[in-house]
Amino acid sequence: MAPICLTWELTYACNLDCVHCLSSSGRRDPRELSTAEAIALVDELRELGVFYVNIGGGEPMIRRDFFTIIEHATTNGVGVKFSTNGTFIDEAAAKRIASMDYLDVQISIDGLDPDTNDAVRGAGTHETAIRAARRLADAGMRDFKLSIVVTRHNVDQLDGLLALADSLGAQLRVTRLRPSGRGAQSWDELHPTDDQQRVIHRWLLDHGDRVLTGDSFFHLNALGESLPGLNMCGAGRVVCLVDPVGDVYACPFVIHEQFRAGNTRDHGGFTTVWRESSLFAELREPGSAGACASCGAYDVCRGGCMAAKFFTGLPLDGPDPECVGGEGERALAEAGPRPVSDVDHSRRPRPITPVPVALVTK
Amino acid sequence: MRRLLTARPETITSAGTIVERTALRLDPDVALRPEPFGALAYHYGTRRLVFLKHPDVVRVVEGLDGSTPTTEVLESCGIPTDRRAAVERALDALVRSGIITEVAA
């Protein structure tokens, strides 16, 4: 047994400081896997029958051995899809990427215009992303992805973003904003409104055949027609995350000790963690519908996203914070304290306790 | 294609149906991975991941060699008559998704 969809964050180092970074990246962690350990992990994944890995970070291209690792993977039957902010895609890198088989690239961009994008990802990042995309297109790379996290501020730009992707010969990928990592601090202001959720659902139904979603919007199925995809939480069942220091988490959105299943450096490596972790065994048990049991939509929304619930202080067997039936809002009003991750590599660590009022008003 | 759903056994061999394509095989770019429910098929070229949701389908797909007529493969895999239509439908979908392909004559 092996994961179907494995995300591997290569490094916590990142030149950007996006407000919704799922992994609170910024500074490299001195314990990050060495080149030899990374290569050995690829070999282990190949033995397990993992078809492809989603590589991210941090900014994965910051690692000097980035191409060594991905070339080892793609030439050994482990396909690679990597996410990048595009900073390090110069003409030479674009040519190298375009010449490789079994390699997909996702360039992150969170708005059609610089204002919308840069407010989330930082000054100049829109221009950087577009320049990288053009370089890939010019190098002959086809069907690379433009990857958008849907926020309150870019919902009405989806048509424009699709047209932008078309004009670059790219494919659009839209994913759900999650309150994970630094997203915990920005989610309240950035997550789509209730009305916007309906717009997203309709838009995905109308464009789902051309747009990738990472199956991340299944909570919207409660609005009626189901979106294409797995339509359930795959955490620990078909999905997991390996972080830069080898820690294995249930999914890319739950970097928190409660969802840490083990480490690839443990005896038996990743394989043993995947097969024998008690956390994963628990996640593989049929879930309880809990507070959602009496809701007619549970069969199609499956209670939504575990990570979204966890990081907004909601019980895991309750409604998703963005439940389209309005239960999320009700639950949030009574939510417990929001868990704070013990893993934070932000270059400017955010205060985790409120700043005393006296200091603010001085 | 849709006709296959309701076709009676004697009409299934009409032109273009799956059993008439005698030279089917697993696409060389596809890897199969056994799973409790059947198997996963991954196409490295198109990045498509497809679920083979029944062990019958897996057996047949593994039996396709690019030369044996599909009817004979179904026969040798011991697919019961009442399961044939379902298996043929599955094969049809696998052809459309590029997981199995026709070898040029």
Image (cartoon, coloured by chain):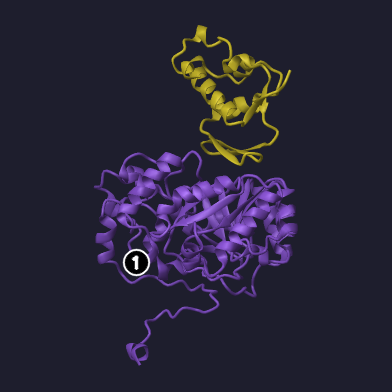
Left or right side of B11 for A359: left
Give the labeled residue for mark 1. A313
Q: Quadrant of the C terminus of chain A?
A: bottom left
Relative height, residue A335 to residue A326 (above, below): below
Task: Give the secondary structure at mark 1.
Answer: loop
Q: Which chain is yellow?
A: B
Q: Nearer the viewer, residue A140 or A200?
A: A140
Q: Residue at x 68, y 46 (%)?
A: A102
Residue A265 spot, x, y in % from top left? 64, 65
Relative height, residue A324 to residue B2 (above, below): below
Q: Which chain is purple?
A: A
Residue A222 spot, x, y in % from top left? 32, 45
Q: Residue under mark 1: which chain is it in?
A: A
Q: Residue at x 49, y 22 (%)?
A: B86
**From this viewpoint, is residue A114 visible?**
yes
Q: Nearer the viewer, residue A131 or A55?
A: A131
Q: Amino acid at mark 1?
A: Gly
